[in-house]
Amino acid sequence: MSTVSNARRGIRVPLLLIVPAIAILVLGMGYPMVWQVVTSFQEYGLPQQFGKPAPFVFLDNYITLATDSQLWLVVAKSLAFCLVTAFLTLGIGTALALLMSSVTKTARLVLQVALLLAWSMPVVSAMTVWIWLFDRRRGAINYLLDMIPGVNMNRFDWLSTPLTFLLVASIIVVWMSVPFVAFSVYAGLTQVSDEVMEAAQLDGANGWQRFWGIILPMIRPVISIVLLLQLIWDLRVFTQIKLLQDAGSKSGEFDLLGTYIYKLGTSAQDFGMASAVSILVLGITVALSWFYIRSLLKEDEA
Amino acid sequence: MSSRLTRGLLSALAIVIALVWVFPVYWMVNSAFLPTAILQSFIPTFFPVKGTFSNFAGAVADGSFFSALGMSVAVTLTVVVFCIVFAFLAAVAISRFRFRGRRSFVIAVLVVQMLPAEGLFIAQYKMVSSVHLLDSVIGVSVIYIAAVVPFTIWMLRGFVAGVPADLEEAAMVDGLSRFGAFMRITFPLLAPGLVASGVYAFLQAWNEFTVALVLLPSESAQTLPLWLRGFVQASATRETDWGQVMAASTLVAVPVIIFFLIVQGRLTSGLVSGAVKG
């Protein structure tokens, strides 16, 4: 890229151009972030909401966190939920991408349109219809499962135990996220050249060998990025859990990190602790994202 | 097994999977058109043969839908306009200039893009409430713009970089100023990019739930996702009227589905382009 007149015009123009973006980022993200870091070192409960000064307690909130078994349970559940959901999404998405590349044009189009429609559902609409599908008494899912001989799902309440609750959440998140993975991996697959595949076939490699030996290494960059994005997105899942809690139970057993922070901040009004947990989530996210950010930076420098 | 047979079987499988995947979307629309009496049966009805629009009429009857629609439109428009302007300027800066601090700025943009709303909403609530902007278009819009602008910058950066600077330089040789060359040559070529980023910002602002839940506590200031949640909750205090709930859900979803189909291609390639190119 050449920039003829940079030297002559000095460096002021680009700086002026980024001022509005920087201003809004500082206001909307930077300031809250700093406030949050500071508050995580303070005692900031109900009295402080009404104007009492917040005393600095240094690491007290973090120590409380570290020794709070309930929090660790929430962290463990969130991590388990995130790993299971992200890998399921990746597996199914990759399988569908491979399917797209080995079916007739019509079948591919039908599948792509179906995935696009699912992908485009606003999350609140999607949650509403899924809750209806899983409805205890009149839901289509219990009705269909009940038709299988030997299965009695009549009035089975999916949202009543934490395990089935999280299973439902996971199914919904997988349903919503698979289209993105499938389209991304499919885009990667279209870059694997036909000649290479034909050569491998002539050399006698079977489908399985071709997948592991040729396709997978060539689409590894896409796979690792979509997996990473899924991990980050599934760790912070909030809307889905919140809306399922609306339909089921709000008790603490059904919390993941997002709803846990929300409750600390709203019901308990303990902003100090809520901030400390938020910092934990932000820390994990940034650590996970670093690899993704580095790969984007490489693209920027290319 | 012959390869044609395999292909046929796989195609059949693909169509079955497509039907399973689209089923929830279909189910929403189907239920939205079914009269309450049919929905109250314990045996689901799979086709809306005796369809009715009464659920839609019921969903918008008390007028709160329209006030939420107004709020959503106001917030979304604000976010789209500011996002495009801010992101466009920043994208020009990072793809047409090399300057000190550029790399730090790019890193900051990428990091902020990854920050989850769920990790910041307590602080954002505190900030917005301390300046008395809860329940206002401005308060929630500032947070949305900050959340959406990083990805929009990144998307537009690709578009600006895609227009060769040589074109501008040629125009400058022909006597245009640098600014004139940019406006006459590069800007028109960016139109698809601006549209795509605008639609992206639209989708984010229109669908957002978490931040809205925290920053718009009053019923009178709800955006559509909050309205839909409230509608479901109000309906659940009696026997949930699933027909009306699904009609409400459909009303929220339709504009999104249309815009999404427009922008989809650009969105995937923006997120994973680095990886695909290797």
Image (cartoon, coloured by chain):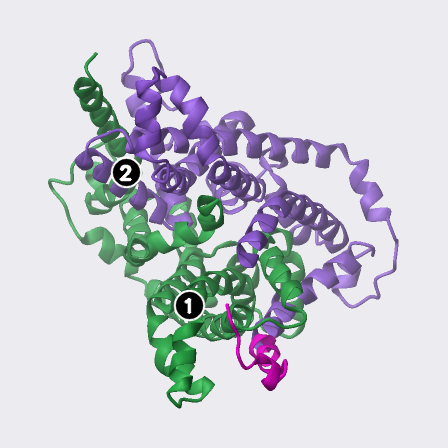
Chain colours: A purple, B green
- Give me the C-alpha separation between circle 2 and circle 1: 27 Å
Task: Specify which label sits upstream in the sequence, 2 or 1.
Answer: 2
Amino acid type of the residue that numbered disc 2 sits on in the rendered structure: Val
Stretch in magenta: A1-19
Residue ID at (19%, 46%): B33
In-image side of B100 versus B24 (left or right): right
Residue A282: x and y, percent? 67, 49
- The disc placed on residue B76 is 1
Q: Nearer the viewer, residue A129 or A96?
A: A96
Residue A270 against residue B78 in the figure, above or below: above
Quadrant of the rendered structure where residue B220 is?
Answer: bottom left
Residue A29, percent across and down? 63, 64
Residue A148 percent coordinates (x, y): 29, 14
Numbered disc 2: secondary structure: helix
Counting the numbered discs, the total is 2
Co-location on one chain, circles 2 and 1:
yes
Image mark for residue B263: none
Judging depth in this view, the residue of A145 and A184 nearest the camera is A184
Secondary structure mainly formed by the magenta segment: helix
Crowding at dot 1, Cα within 10 Å, few <14 / some 14-19 / many 20+, comes out as many
Q: Measuring from the top left, give residue B186's x and y in whole percent.
A: 38, 75
Q: Is residue A91 visible?
A: no
The residue singled out by tag 2 in the image is B22
Circle 1 SS class: helix
Pointer 1 chain: B
Graded by Cα atoms within 10 Å as few (under 14), some (14 to 19) or many (20 or more), the crowding at tag 2 reads some
Q: Is residue A4 magenta?
A: yes
Quadrant in which residue A50 is drawn: bottom right
Amino acid on which the number 1 mark rests in the picture: Thr
